[in-house]
Amino acid sequence: MYVLGIWDGHDAGAALIKDSNIIAAVNEERYTKRKLDVGFPANSIRACLNIAKIKPEEVKVIAAATSDLAKTLTRIFPSVKEYYYQFRRRKAKPNFQHPKRAFKYKLTQFGPNFITTGLSESLIKINLKNLGFSNYKFVIYDQHMCHAAGVFMSNMKKALVITLDGVGDGKSGSVNIFENNKLKRISSISSRDSLGIFFEQVTNLLGMRELEDEGKVMALSNYAYPVQDKDNKMLSLFEVKGLNIKARYSVTRQYSFLKNLLWNTQREQFAYMAQKTLEIKMLELFANAIKQTKIRDVCWSGGVASNIKANMLVRKIAHDWYVFPAMGDGGLALGAALLANNEFYKISSYKNEDIYFGDGFSNREIEEVLKKSKGIKYAKERDIAKKVAGLVLSGKIVLWFQGRTEFGPRALGNRSILASAESYGIKDTLNMMVKNRDWFQPFCPSLLEEDARLIFCDYDNRPARFMTMGYMVKKDRMKQMANVINVDNSARPQMVGNENMLFRRLLLEVKKRNKLGVVLNTSFNIHGMPICNTPQDAIIVLKATRCRYLAIGNFMVEQKS
């Protein structure tokens, strides 16, 4: 009953399912230390097997995502994929391998066929054989079906499922219905009409890294003077027709249009116009789908679903909602496994209440690393949560390493950097000295689920566990939330229930003295690097950031200098 899912493209990874339990889901970047790594996820596959304590021959079903022309070519010529990765991350300059933008956009528009699917299957199987896999059933699924499979984790009985991203298998989006334990597609959006590529182009033109810094565009848009819709020239680029989206121009002509528009537009206004266009067009599509299907329980995924301001608008027209926590390509491996488990074993709901699907380490393993580390001192704490709560309330920054690694792009209280939500100056210190991020990027709060109604004026009694949704902070709570709200008074919270009892205990200690159980929570990494995975990673980041305190397992670590 073991099902393995793999994804060997942007943000490669693997996932392992047994029956109705997700055993493991990890991404290659955590092992190679290359953020959003590409390529065959050999390290991730080994990690999944190690977590489950099984051998390759015990896996009887293996599922992969995507077999379009562009993906197949990069499987044949992995050096091209590696070069583009280096170029996109600003680690390589253009050379003879650098594809012309028009050629790249054209190539990615071709969907799969029996030739590309056959070649992709053969190439993936060669890598699997090298890892010891044999005698298994193999299937490749459509990328947008893999995104849509996130609905299985929602435990909804019937739902409208919408996907929006850049491009994959010749499509940029889809509208689906989940009913009677099955997914059925009712509409597809072509790659030419991609809201995801549109936002990717805006990110690139603003001098940021596409496929990585789109969240910065969303944050920057809040610092613009508002542009009236009648003056927003980007709104004319897309038209929503029923369950479809139509672009005014080809992808290459659209890029030229945006480039010309940026020439005499301030970058904050440019970001604002792009964000508003995404919000309006995305909301129109969801509203049309709800009206046509008469289904108001909505799930969505794909890279565009990482835009929490657009998500916030969709939430307000839905009855119930769920955003797949690993909404981008990093979630495709798990999506493929979920689809295969549904196809072969008819399973469409899961027992997991959290997404701590990665590696974990015992106190013995942690102490072995601490003993070998220079420049630190450490001591075992009877109540590590209480100790850290006290440090945070006194204005200190604490690195927090506990339990199993989170799946997806968000730190959810196991690999986090913690600080006070209200101490003046900590936000700038974190951005400029610890995280090395742009000054305009906001931080997020982790808070007790029961305090959400006290903090947010638009809380809908549906706890947001995974930092996938935006909310507006009440005016009388802004001082207590000063470090974790955006300039527009919105926030992207993690609402903590009983799924992480140690982290919850820390928040309860904060509440005893502060009347609200809330802390600033940002990912345990340096900007541009993956989130920490191992105790060794934690020590490296501790020294690189020059932070003083690290709470790891039951140990309180302090830098000597």
Image (cartoon, rainbow, N blue to C red):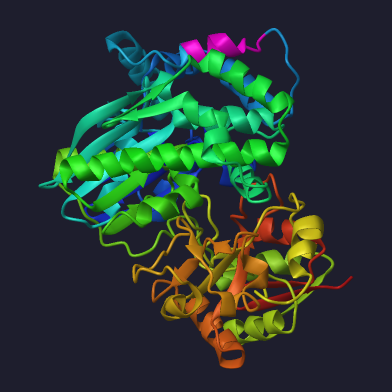
Vertical position of residue 437 compared to residue 285: above or below: below
Q: Identify which residue is drawn at 59% across, 45% down.
A: 218
Q: Is residue 27 left or right of residue 85?
A: left
Count the labels in the image. Answer: 0
Question: 472 and 122: which one is in front?
Answer: 472
User: Magenta stretch?
Assistant: 97-106
**Is residue 296 something one can see in this rendering?**
yes
Q: Is residue 444 left or right of residue 122?
A: right
Residue 178 x, y percent position in the rendering: 18, 44
Q: Main secondary structure of the magenta part?
A: helix
**Is residue 45 something one can see in this rendering?**
no
In magenta stretch: residue 266: no
Q: Among all residues in the image, which is located at the extreme left?
A: 180
Vertical position of residue 425 compared to residue 285: above or below: below
Q: Identify which residue is drawn at 41% across, 23% down.
A: 193
Residue 119 x, y percent position in the rendering: 36, 13
Residue 400 x, y percent position in the rendering: 63, 69
Q: Give the quadrant of residue 123.
A: top left
Q: Identify which residue is drawn at 42% across, 15% down.
A: 109
Q: Identify which residue is drawn at 68% across, 24% down.
A: 87
